[in-house]
């Protein structure tokens, strides 16, 4: 894939890329350091307060999906931003901005499930 000539010269893009990569690293490290697979045989991996199901349990290693999700959406957002930059600069910036929101929400949801588990 060809990187647009002035992609890394745009201050907004460089700042958003830095924040995206830092948050992605934070999500991955937070998940890897928080999940304790030896603590219990099951943990809450999904919680639905409005249904009769309530808590859905699974193995603690299922929580590693949050780390994979954070890494995948960051890689996808960066690739999409690179491809869209020469067409619409503002759309490429919006993709990076929305990825920041998605990563913050990933941390919030993982933390909420962590408080249910322990």
Image (cartoon, helix red, strand yellow):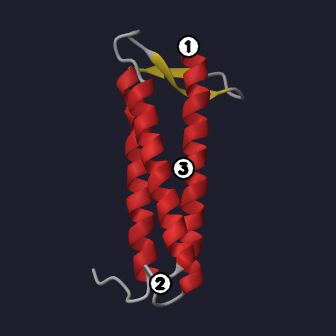
> Which SS class for mark 1?
loop
Q: Is residue 54 above or below residue 80?
A: above
What percent of the width, then of the height, locates residue 66? 44, 39
Quadrant assignment, res 59? top left
Q: Quadrant of the N terminus?
A: bottom left
Instruction: Name the foreground residue: 38 vs 48.
Output: 38
> Which SS class for mark 2?
loop
Residue at label 1? 118
- Which residue occupies 42% across, 46% down? 25
What percent of the width, then of the height, locates residue 102? 57, 53
The numbered dot on residue 85 is 2
Mark 1 crowdedness (10 Å alpha carbons): few <14, some 14-19, many ≥20: few
Decide which of tag 1 and tag 2 comes sooner along the chain: 2
- Do the CB atoms of the residues marked 1 and 2 lie less than 8 Å apart? no
- Which residue occupies 67% across, 27% down? 51
The numbered dot on residue 67 is none
- Which residue occupies 42% across, 14% down? 42
User: Quick check: 61 left or right of 27?
Assistant: left
Quadrant assignment, res 31? top left
User: Quick check: 85 left or right of 90?
Assistant: left
* Label 1 to label 2: alpha-carbon separation: 44 Å
Instruction: Name the foreground residue: 79 vs 42.
Output: 79
Instruction: Name the foreground residue: 52 vs 38.
Output: 38
């Amino acid at each position: 894939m060809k990187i647009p000539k002035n992609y890394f010269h745009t201050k907004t893009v460089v700042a958003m890329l830095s924040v995206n990569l830092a948050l992605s690293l934070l999500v991955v490290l937070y998940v890897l350091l928080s999940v304790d697979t030896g603590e219990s045989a099951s943990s809450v991996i999904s919680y639905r307060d409005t249904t009769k199901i309530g808590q859905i349990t699974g193995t603690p290693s299922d929580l590693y999906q949050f780390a994979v999700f954070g890494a995948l959406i960051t890689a996808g957002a960066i690739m999409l931003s690179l491809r869209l930059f020469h067409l619409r600069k503002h759309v490429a910036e919006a993709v990076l901005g929305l990825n920041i929101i998605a990563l913050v929400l990933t941390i919030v949801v993982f933390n909420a499930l962590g408080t249910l588990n322990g």
